[in-house]
Image (cartoon, rainbow, N blue to C red):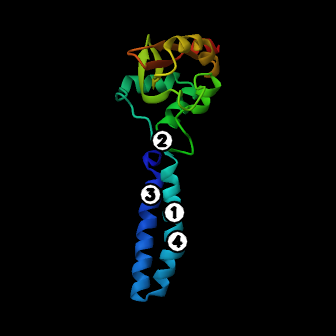
Amino acid sequence: MLRQISLGTLGLAVGGILSVMGFAAYFSGNPTLNLVGFFYGIPILLGGLALKASELKPVPFAQPTSPPVEALREQQATSTQNQIRKDVTRFRYGQEAHLDTSLSYLGLSPTDEERPLLQAIWEEAIDGQYALVLEFESPLISFEEWQKKQDKIERFFGPGLHVTLKQPQTDRVVVALIAAPEAIA
């Protein structure tokens, strides 16, 4: 629940209320509330503005996860799959894009302008295995370049995963991180 709350918006709301209360108290001659508004309200308001300026919104689920797939997740999901799912579905601060450092390491983000952007995620069962599916908008990195990096992507995201790539339409790449429990043993 808390992952879905924007700290920037919360800071703006609380700081705004306290600041308005402080200004109202200043003009009405109430020194105690005046101090609360100035010493707490304005810094919280400025902090909220700073967080809002560096905020990265959560990636939406393209489709809801069905109960059978949730059960499969509980049984088969790797720690990497769980970490990615949790990281990209919450507000982040101070990052340019979701998975930006991972894409850079994989050689799929030579510059900020060329970086593929994560547009949606979903969970599904592929051949009876749990899969976390990531859909990227990739207008400047070709699908062939993604295919060249497939082995590196598989090694990067760790043991116990198999990676498949698809191109449903031009400028879109779908990366499926499929749990492969037999690969761990």
Closer mark to the observer between disc 4 and disc 1 = 1
| Circle 2/circle 3 CB separation < 8 Å | no
Quadrant hosting residue 103: top right
| Tag 1: amino acid | Leu
| Circle 3/circle 4 CB separation < 8 Å | no
Q: Nearer the viewer, residue 67 or 104?
A: 104
Q: What residue sits 35% from the left and 26% below the top? A: 66
Q: What residue sits 51% from the left and 75% below the top? A: 38
First in sequence, mark 3 or 4: give its number: 3
Q: Residues within 10 Å of mark 3 (few under 14, many from 20)?
A: some
| Tag 2: amino acid | Arg
- Relative to 111, is 74 on the left or the right? left
Q: Quadrant of the C terminus?
A: top right
Marks 4 and 2, Cα distance to the nearest angstrom? Answer: 27 Å
Marks 4 and 1, Cα distance to the nearest angstrom? Answer: 10 Å
Which of the labelled discs sits on residue 10, or is there none? 3
Q: What residue sits 46% from the left and 24% below the top? A: 136
Q: Position of residue 142 (x, y in %)?
A: 50, 15
Quadrant hosting residue 166: top left
Marks 3 and 4, Cα distance to the nearest angstrom? Answer: 14 Å
Q: What residue sits 41% from the left and 69% below the top? A: 17
Residue at disc 2, secondary structure = loop
Residue at disc 1, secondary structure = helix
Which residue is most to the bottom?
A: 29
Query: What residue sits right under mark 2 in the picture?
Result: 90
Residue at disc 4, secondary structure = helix
Query: What residue sits right under mark 1 in the picture?
Result: 46
First in sequence, mark 4 or 1: give its number: 4
